[in-house]
Every structure is written in structure tokens, then in C-alpha cells.
Image: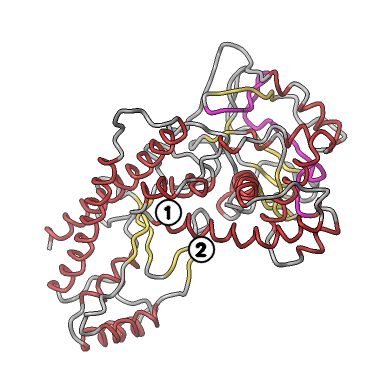
Amino acid sequence: MILHSVIISNSLWARSQRAILPSLFRCLCKSSDAFTSVSSREGPCVDENCSDFLPWLGNKAGGEISSLLSIGKSAYGRALCAAKDIQTGDCLLKVPYSVQLAPDNLPPAMARLLGDEVGDVAKVALLVLYEKHLGKKSEWAPYISRLPLPEDMHSSVFWSDIELEMIRQSALYEETLKQQKQIEKDFLAVKLVSDNFPARFQNITLQDFTYAYGLVTSRAWMSSRGVSMIPFADFLNHDGTSESYVLSDEGRQHSEVIADRDFAPGDEVLIRYGKFSNATLLLDFGFTVSCNRYDQVRVALNVPQHDALYTQKLEVLGRDRTPRIKDDNEFTYYENSFAIREVRDGSSRGKGIPQSLRAFARIMACDSQQELDDLAKEAAENDGRLARKPLKNKNRELAAHQLLLSEMSRLIKDHNERIKSLAPTPPTPREESALRQRLALDFLSGELRVLKSASAWLESYCSRM
């Protein structure tokens, strides 16, 4: 997922701007366990294989990138650790735009051939493949050589058809297929360019391009240069409770991270990638978070074609809804798709179940043209939104919520059956498949938790009527 990083006009910590311009982050995780702060008091963690990385990057940038962090290893892969005591508010790193990989790093001849046919993600993916082909001759070799290998990538776009069947019940299944089709489309344009420069590329396959594309979508930020990969900053792992993000200082032309807490030498330093559900984390980053507070479930509703008022209901709904919605922290969805979040205990209003979903159900529950006309009139006399208030006819209000309850029950049954089928059984599958099975289990379990909370609230609401 390519999102805008937080933009600031100076080096002050602009935490309050996070809600306006969400950041994009990435992970080298090989675990489906919960991501929380990981600390070690046994001394600084150091990855000896990366001892030359910071000197190389500092030399390329013409200045020090960080004196507070070292490259190390954690339970989740490569990480950044405190090299000395860090205080809240300290600037952890500064990476100039000039040492970030962006579309304008592509050789001009290649960029001209691509034109506007493909987006920035595909352009940077092609750039990665170009630099990778150069090997040690590439000026970016110390960075390119430390990018994760294909076997370390577990975003759902890398899953086989059989593996994707594990999550067919979820909207993530269709979203993954959509992203795969976009990759295939971009590959056709990129292949034409690579074929024109056979000396600069090996025979690029769809698999090669998918790998590079996945690197970009899981690691890149948006800045004034477009989609950019930020060496060193993208070694930071995720902590869902962190208040640290990558900040883009357009005035000083660099990206930076400010510490949101104190760290002792050896502590792993983490940032929050965003308020992402496991669907987004799995699609773009290849990991899940157990008991993810931001989990949600996409529920799609449609008026049955056998409904006697099918045409009239579609007409009424068509006047009330927007064509498409984009959630900053999630993928795009259509007007009859609703994001349900966990309904916390004690929520009398069912916070987490969208009012738009309940309104849709109220329209579906109508059984006369007069009811539809009354709802349309009520909407026109107020804010224009249909059926956002309880129906005056309590029987119809009950029917609407029983319809939703029925849909929740169906989804719960499907998720339970799938989770049961994914329970590990001997013989133990190969490591990669076992990991993706655990990811699918964790993902579906999170959705099931959300569905059960919504179902419990709907049952309570119906019983009160």
C-alpha cells in the first residue's frame, strides 16, 4: 500500500498531522505472532553482515544518517536497535531525499518508454530490477543486496491459488486477485521496456516483477519525488502501540523519525506502520497481528433479484450512495460493501457497525412502495441520507436487524468451518506453507472476533425490541 508520509515544514515532531496524511511502512517479518515492542537488555544487537551499510549510506548522503541506531536482528528479522541511550523526542535518523530510490532515478531513456502507462510503483519496481541486474556495479548495491529474498515475502499476492483458498471467505481474497491483475498489467508495459534494453536486464519474468513490485508496495513512501524507497528507515519494524512515524520534511528535503519513548542500548526501536487491519497488513506487508485492535471485516449486501421491489430499492439506494469509497488505511471498496469493526462490550449504540450498513438493511426490509417513499421523503427533509434513524414501524426495524444478524451468523459459520479445516495436522507441511497457514488462521480468527462482537450486539438490539 502506497500512502503519503506525514509532511512537516520543519524538524519538529508533527504527531498531530498523522491523522491527515497516513504513512506507509514495511516489515521483514517472518512470524504471525503479535507485534509489540521487543526489548533486550543484553547489550546492543548488531548484524555483522550490515557493518558497512551505514558508512556507505552516510558517504552517499554526504552526512551522518544516525548516531543513535545500529542494524541488528530481532525475532522478526532485520531491525534497528538503540546503539546508546535514546530520550523521548530525539531524532533517530535523517535520510535525505537524494539517497532515496524514486521514479526519477530511472535512466531517462527507460522513463520515456514507460511514459504514463504505468504508475510510480511499477517504475520503482523496474528500477530495483535494473539495479539488481547491475550487481556490485550498482551504486545502490549495499542496499539492493540487503532487500528481502523472494522466499521471505509473504504478502498475499505471493500466495498460490491453493493458499489463497484459505481466505476465500474474506474480501481480502478478491482484493488480492485485483492486485495480482494490476501487477500483470504493469508487467506487460515494463516487459516492453526491458526488451528494448537487453544488455541492462536479464529476461524479466512475471515472477521477478511481482517480487520487485511487492518490495515497493511494502517499503515505499510518498514524497515530493513520488513513490520512494528509503534505505535504513525501512529496517524499522512495527509496534501497534508506537506513536513514531516516518516524517517527510519537504523544506529540508529529508525523511526523519522522532522517538516517542526512551530506549536503552540494545532495545529494538519500532514505529507504527499505520492503523491497519490484518487484511491490509497481510495484503501489503505479509504479516498479521494477533488481537489486532484495528481489525475489521468487509461485508457486502445486495438486494435479492427476487425481491418484489428490487428495481425500486435499487433506484432509492442509487440516489443515496456514493460510487466508491477510499479508506486511507484500507483498500478501496464499493457502495454495497461495509467495514465492520469490533463492537466493544457495553456499546449501547453498536459503535463499529456502520450506520450506512443498518440503513441499507432497513431499505432491504421494506415491503411496500409507500415505505420507500416515506424514507425518501424523510431523507429529503433532513440531511439527504436514507434510513439513518430507526424505522417507525418496529416490525420493519426488527426485520432489518434480523437480516443483518442472519448475515453475521452465515459469515461466522463460514469462518468457523474454515478455521477448523486449517488446524495443523500431520504430516507437517513445508515451512513456507506452514507459515502462511498460520497467517491465514490468525487473519480469519481476527475477522471471526469482529463478527461475533457484531452478532452479539445485534442479538441484544433485537431482544430489546
Q: Which quadrant does the C terminus fall into?
A: bottom left
Q: Does residue 74 appear to the left or right of 335 in the view shown?
A: right
- In the image, 275 versus 132, the foreground residue is 132
Q: Which residues are magenta?
A: 76-103
Measured as percent of width and height from the top left, residue 40 is found at 54, 17
- In the image, 99 versus 377, the foreground residue is 99
- In the image, 174 versus 53, the foreground residue is 174
| Label of residue 172 in the image | 1
Is 94 colored magenta in this rendering? Answer: yes
Measured as percent of width and height from the top left, residue 96 is found at 79, 41
Give amino acid for label 2: Lys
Give amino acid for label 1: Leu
| Label of residue 326 in the image | 2
Is 450 colored magenta in this rendering? Answer: no
Residue 320 sits in which quadrant?
A: bottom left
Is any atom of residue 249 visible in this view? Answer: no
